[in-house]
Image: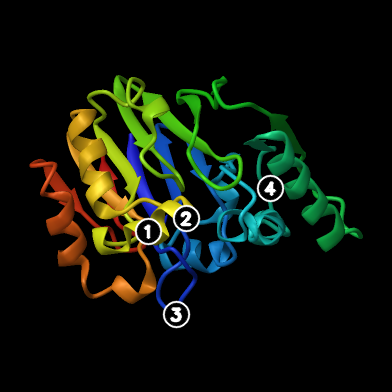
Amino acid sequence: MILTVIGSCANQISNREGVSLLIESGCDNLLIDCGPGIVAAFGRCCRRTSEINNVLLTHVHADHMAGFPYFVWNRNFECMGSTPPDDLHVYGENETVSLAKHMLEHCYPELIFPFKVIYHEIQAGDFFSSGILDIETICANHVVPCISAVVKGKGRRLVYTSDTLYNEQLVDKAQNADILVHEGMMPKSMDALANKVKHSTSFLAGKFAYDVNAKQLLMVHIAPSLLGKENVLIEEAALNYQGFISIPYDGSVYRI
Protein backbone atom coordinates (compact mmCIF):
# COMPACT_ATOMS: atom_id res chain seq x y z
CA MET A 1 0.00 0.00 0.00
CA ILE A 2 0.99 3.61 -0.59
CA LEU A 3 -0.20 6.44 1.66
CA THR A 4 -0.22 10.04 0.43
CA VAL A 5 -1.00 12.63 3.07
CA ILE A 6 -3.10 15.08 1.07
CA GLY A 7 -3.69 17.31 4.12
CA SER A 8 -2.26 17.24 7.65
CA CYS A 9 -3.44 20.33 9.51
CA ALA A 10 -6.28 21.04 11.94
CA ASN A 11 -7.33 24.00 9.79
CA GLN A 12 -7.03 25.29 6.26
CA ILE A 13 -4.14 27.78 6.09
CA SER A 14 -2.02 29.20 3.27
CA ASN A 15 0.25 26.16 2.89
CA ARG A 16 -1.68 23.38 4.66
CA GLU A 17 -5.07 21.75 4.34
CA GLY A 18 -7.28 19.87 6.77
CA VAL A 19 -6.57 16.17 7.21
CA SER A 20 -7.12 14.03 4.15
CA LEU A 21 -5.45 10.71 3.32
CA LEU A 22 -5.14 8.86 0.01
CA ILE A 23 -4.48 5.12 0.33
CA GLU A 24 -3.65 3.10 -2.79
CA SER A 25 -2.93 -0.54 -3.52
CA GLY A 26 -2.43 -1.47 -7.13
CA CYS A 27 -5.32 0.04 -9.11
CA ASP A 28 -7.48 0.40 -6.00
CA ASN A 29 -7.75 3.60 -3.98
CA LEU A 30 -9.53 5.18 -1.04
CA LEU A 31 -9.65 8.89 -0.16
CA ILE A 32 -10.44 9.56 3.48
CA ASP A 33 -12.09 12.94 4.06
CA CYS A 34 -12.59 15.86 1.74
CA GLY A 35 -12.03 19.26 3.37
CA PRO A 36 -12.58 22.70 1.82
CA GLY A 37 -9.22 22.89 0.01
CA ILE A 38 -9.20 19.36 -1.34
CA VAL A 39 -8.93 20.26 -5.03
CA ALA A 40 -6.01 22.65 -4.48
CA ALA A 41 -4.36 20.06 -2.23
CA PHE A 42 -4.59 17.44 -4.97
CA GLY A 43 -2.99 19.91 -7.36
CA ARG A 44 -0.08 20.58 -5.00
CA CYS A 45 0.43 16.81 -4.74
CA CYS A 46 0.43 16.57 -8.57
CA ARG A 47 -2.54 14.22 -8.43
CA ARG A 48 -5.90 14.21 -10.19
CA THR A 49 -9.24 13.95 -8.44
CA SER A 50 -10.55 11.93 -11.41
CA GLU A 51 -8.24 9.08 -10.37
CA ILE A 52 -10.23 8.58 -7.16
CA ASN A 53 -13.12 6.12 -7.12
CA ASN A 54 -13.80 5.68 -3.39
CA VAL A 55 -14.28 8.24 -0.61
CA LEU A 56 -14.80 7.66 3.11
CA LEU A 57 -16.18 10.66 5.01
CA THR A 58 -15.50 10.23 8.72
CA HIS A 59 -17.85 12.89 10.10
CA VAL A 60 -19.84 16.04 9.36
CA HIS A 61 -17.39 18.74 10.46
CA ALA A 62 -16.59 21.10 7.61
CA ASP A 63 -12.82 20.63 7.71
CA HIS A 64 -13.47 16.97 6.81
CA MET A 65 -16.18 17.25 4.15
CA ALA A 66 -16.90 20.84 3.02
CA GLY A 67 -14.91 20.27 -0.18
CA PHE A 68 -16.91 17.25 -1.29
CA PRO A 69 -19.14 18.97 -3.90
CA TYR A 70 -16.19 20.72 -5.51
CA PHE A 71 -14.22 17.47 -5.49
CA VAL A 72 -17.02 15.74 -7.43
CA TRP A 73 -17.35 18.68 -9.84
CA ASN A 74 -13.59 18.67 -10.44
CA ARG A 75 -13.57 14.96 -11.27
CA ASN A 76 -15.84 15.87 -14.17
CA PHE A 77 -13.97 19.06 -15.11
CA GLU A 78 -10.62 17.28 -15.39
CA CYS A 79 -12.02 14.87 -17.96
CA MET A 80 -14.19 17.20 -20.07
CA GLY A 81 -13.81 16.30 -23.73
CA SER A 82 -12.35 12.90 -22.94
CA THR A 83 -13.33 9.65 -21.26
CA PRO A 84 -15.25 10.40 -18.04
CA PRO A 85 -14.01 8.99 -14.73
CA ASP A 86 -15.46 5.85 -13.22
CA ASP A 87 -18.39 5.94 -10.83
CA LEU A 88 -17.62 7.41 -7.41
CA HIS A 89 -18.48 5.40 -4.28
CA VAL A 90 -19.01 7.46 -1.11
CA TYR A 91 -19.09 5.84 2.33
CA GLY A 92 -20.15 7.35 5.65
CA GLU A 93 -22.65 7.23 8.46
CA ASN A 94 -26.24 8.29 7.79
CA GLU A 95 -25.94 11.96 8.76
CA THR A 96 -22.62 12.35 6.95
CA VAL A 97 -23.76 10.74 3.71
CA SER A 98 -27.04 12.67 3.76
CA LEU A 99 -25.16 15.95 4.15
CA ALA A 100 -22.73 15.08 1.35
CA LYS A 101 -25.60 14.28 -1.01
CA HIS A 102 -27.48 17.45 -0.01
CA MET A 103 -24.42 19.65 -0.61
CA LEU A 104 -23.73 18.20 -4.04
CA GLU A 105 -27.36 18.48 -5.18
CA HIS A 106 -27.63 22.09 -4.02
CA CYS A 107 -24.19 23.26 -5.18
CA TYR A 108 -24.65 21.92 -8.73
CA PRO A 109 -28.41 21.45 -9.29
CA GLU A 110 -28.05 22.06 -13.03
CA LEU A 111 -25.47 19.34 -13.69
CA ILE A 112 -25.89 15.72 -14.65
CA PHE A 113 -22.47 14.17 -14.20
CA PRO A 114 -21.30 11.55 -16.74
CA PHE A 115 -20.64 9.14 -13.86
CA LYS A 116 -22.72 7.97 -10.92
CA VAL A 117 -22.16 9.10 -7.35
CA ILE A 118 -23.15 6.04 -5.33
CA TYR A 119 -23.73 6.60 -1.62
CA HIS A 120 -23.19 3.79 0.89
CA GLU A 121 -24.59 4.32 4.36
CA ILE A 122 -22.45 2.51 6.91
CA GLN A 123 -22.27 2.34 10.69
CA ALA A 124 -19.30 2.16 13.00
CA GLY A 125 -18.44 -1.52 13.25
CA ASP A 126 -19.17 -2.22 9.58
CA PHE A 127 -16.79 -3.67 7.00
CA PHE A 128 -16.63 -2.70 3.35
CA SER A 129 -14.27 -3.29 0.45
CA SER A 130 -13.24 -0.90 -2.29
CA GLY A 131 -11.58 -3.64 -4.30
CA ILE A 132 -8.19 -4.79 -3.02
CA LEU A 133 -8.56 -2.63 0.08
CA ASP A 134 -10.68 -3.86 2.99
CA ILE A 135 -11.91 -1.30 5.52
CA GLU A 136 -13.21 -1.85 9.01
CA THR A 137 -14.86 1.10 10.77
CA ILE A 138 -14.83 1.78 14.51
CA CYS A 139 -16.64 4.44 16.52
CA ALA A 140 -14.30 7.31 17.45
CA ASN A 141 -14.51 9.37 20.65
CA HIS A 142 -15.44 12.79 19.27
CA VAL A 143 -18.10 15.46 19.89
CA VAL A 144 -20.16 14.25 16.90
CA PRO A 145 -20.54 10.74 15.48
CA CYS A 146 -17.19 9.96 13.89
CA ILE A 147 -15.46 6.96 12.33
CA SER A 148 -11.97 5.58 12.92
CA ALA A 149 -10.79 3.16 10.22
CA VAL A 150 -8.53 0.15 9.80
CA VAL A 151 -7.48 -0.25 6.15
CA LYS A 152 -5.99 -3.57 5.03
CA GLY A 153 -4.35 -4.42 1.73
CA LYS A 154 -1.84 -7.07 0.64
CA GLY A 155 -1.07 -8.07 4.20
CA ARG A 156 -0.46 -4.52 5.43
CA ARG A 157 -2.57 -2.41 7.79
CA LEU A 158 -3.05 1.32 8.16
CA VAL A 159 -5.01 2.65 11.13
CA TYR A 160 -6.52 6.14 11.04
CA THR A 161 -8.09 7.47 14.22
CA SER A 162 -9.77 10.55 12.72
CA ASP A 163 -10.75 13.25 15.26
CA THR A 164 -10.84 11.61 18.66
CA LEU A 165 -9.64 11.41 22.21
CA TYR A 166 -7.86 8.19 23.18
CA ASN A 167 -10.11 5.56 21.57
CA GLU A 168 -10.32 2.42 23.68
CA GLN A 169 -12.68 0.80 21.16
CA LEU A 170 -9.91 0.92 18.56
CA VAL A 171 -7.11 -0.62 20.66
CA ASP A 172 -7.75 -4.27 19.78
CA LYS A 173 -8.35 -3.55 16.11
CA ALA A 174 -5.18 -1.44 15.80
CA GLN A 175 -2.71 -3.96 17.23
CA ASN A 176 0.62 -4.13 15.33
CA ALA A 177 -0.44 -1.53 12.78
CA ASP A 178 2.14 -0.96 10.05
CA ILE A 179 1.30 2.75 10.13
CA LEU A 180 -0.79 4.49 12.77
CA VAL A 181 -2.11 7.89 11.66
CA HIS A 182 -3.24 9.48 14.91
CA GLU A 183 -4.47 12.92 15.73
CA GLY A 184 -1.91 14.88 17.76
CA MET A 185 -3.49 18.30 17.68
CA MET A 186 -2.05 19.91 20.80
CA PRO A 187 0.47 19.48 23.64
CA LYS A 188 -0.29 17.93 27.01
CA SER A 189 -0.43 21.39 28.60
CA MET A 190 -3.76 21.81 26.78
CA ASP A 191 -5.35 18.70 28.31
CA ALA A 192 -8.41 20.58 29.56
CA LEU A 193 -9.21 21.97 26.13
CA ALA A 194 -8.51 18.61 24.46
CA ASN A 195 -10.97 16.88 26.77
CA LYS A 196 -13.60 19.55 26.15
CA VAL A 197 -13.44 19.43 22.36
CA LYS A 198 -12.50 15.72 22.22
CA HIS A 199 -9.27 16.08 20.31
CA SER A 200 -6.08 14.22 21.15
CA THR A 201 -2.84 15.55 22.55
CA SER A 202 0.47 14.29 21.20
CA PHE A 203 1.02 12.61 24.58
CA LEU A 204 -2.13 10.52 24.06
CA ALA A 205 -1.12 9.74 20.48
CA GLY A 206 2.15 8.32 21.81
CA LYS A 207 0.32 6.33 24.48
CA PHE A 208 -2.02 4.85 21.90
CA ALA A 209 0.90 3.98 19.59
CA TYR A 210 2.62 2.19 22.47
CA ASP A 211 -0.53 0.34 23.53
CA VAL A 212 -1.13 -1.03 20.02
CA ASN A 213 2.55 -1.72 19.28
CA ALA A 214 2.43 0.38 16.10
CA LYS A 215 5.44 0.10 13.79
CA GLN A 216 5.38 3.85 13.20
CA LEU A 217 3.32 6.84 14.25
CA LEU A 218 2.25 9.72 12.03
CA MET A 219 0.63 12.62 13.87
CA VAL A 220 -1.83 14.80 11.96
CA HIS A 221 -4.55 17.39 12.63
CA ILE A 222 -1.85 19.67 14.00
CA ALA A 223 -2.99 23.06 15.30
CA PRO A 224 -1.64 25.85 13.05
CA SER A 225 -0.13 27.61 16.08
CA LEU A 226 2.14 24.58 16.59
CA LEU A 227 3.50 24.38 13.06
CA GLY A 228 7.18 25.11 13.38
CA LYS A 229 7.09 23.64 16.89
CA GLU A 230 6.65 20.03 15.83
CA ASN A 231 9.56 19.00 18.03
CA VAL A 232 7.43 19.75 21.10
CA LEU A 233 4.70 17.37 19.94
CA ILE A 234 7.14 14.65 18.87
CA GLU A 235 9.02 14.81 22.18
CA GLU A 236 5.77 14.47 24.12
CA ALA A 237 4.65 11.49 22.03
CA ALA A 238 8.07 9.92 22.59
CA LEU A 239 7.52 9.94 26.35
CA ASN A 240 5.22 6.96 25.75
CA TYR A 241 6.31 5.52 22.40
CA GLN A 242 9.89 4.77 21.36
CA GLY A 243 9.17 3.88 17.72
CA PHE A 244 9.45 6.08 14.64
CA ILE A 245 7.37 9.29 14.96
CA SER A 246 6.80 11.90 12.28
CA ILE A 247 4.53 14.83 11.53
CA PRO A 248 4.01 14.80 7.75
CA TYR A 249 3.87 17.74 5.42
CA ASP A 250 1.01 17.88 2.93
CA GLY A 251 2.08 15.73 0.01
CA SER A 252 4.23 13.33 2.06
CA VAL A 253 4.22 9.77 0.66
CA TYR A 254 4.78 6.58 2.66
CA ARG A 255 5.18 3.01 1.45
CA ILE A 256 3.42 0.67 3.85
Q: Return the x and y of residue 33 as percentages of the image width and height.
A: 54, 49
Residue 83, numbered label: 4
Instruction: Estimate the spatial distance between the alpha carbons at disc 4 and disc 2, rounded to whole Å.
Output: 48 Å
Q: Quadrant of the C terminus?
A: top left
Near mark 3 (Cα within 10 A), the count class, few <14, some 14-19 or many ≥20, is few
Q: Residue furthest bottom?
A: 14
Q: Return the x and y of residue 8 as percentages of the image width and height.
A: 38, 59
131 to 90, vertically: above or below: above
Instruction: Estimate the spatial distance between the alpha carbons at disc 3 and disc 2, rounded to whole Å.
Output: 27 Å
Q: Which residue is mark 1?
A: 192
Q: Which residue is mark 2?
A: 196
Instruction: Estimate the spatial distance between the alpha carbons at disc 4 and disc 3, rounded to whole Å.
Output: 33 Å
Q: Which residue is mark 3?
A: 14
Q: Earlier in the sequence, mark 3 or mark 2?
A: 3
Q: Nearer the viewer, mark 4 or mark 3?
A: 3
Q: Quadrant of the N terminus?
A: top left
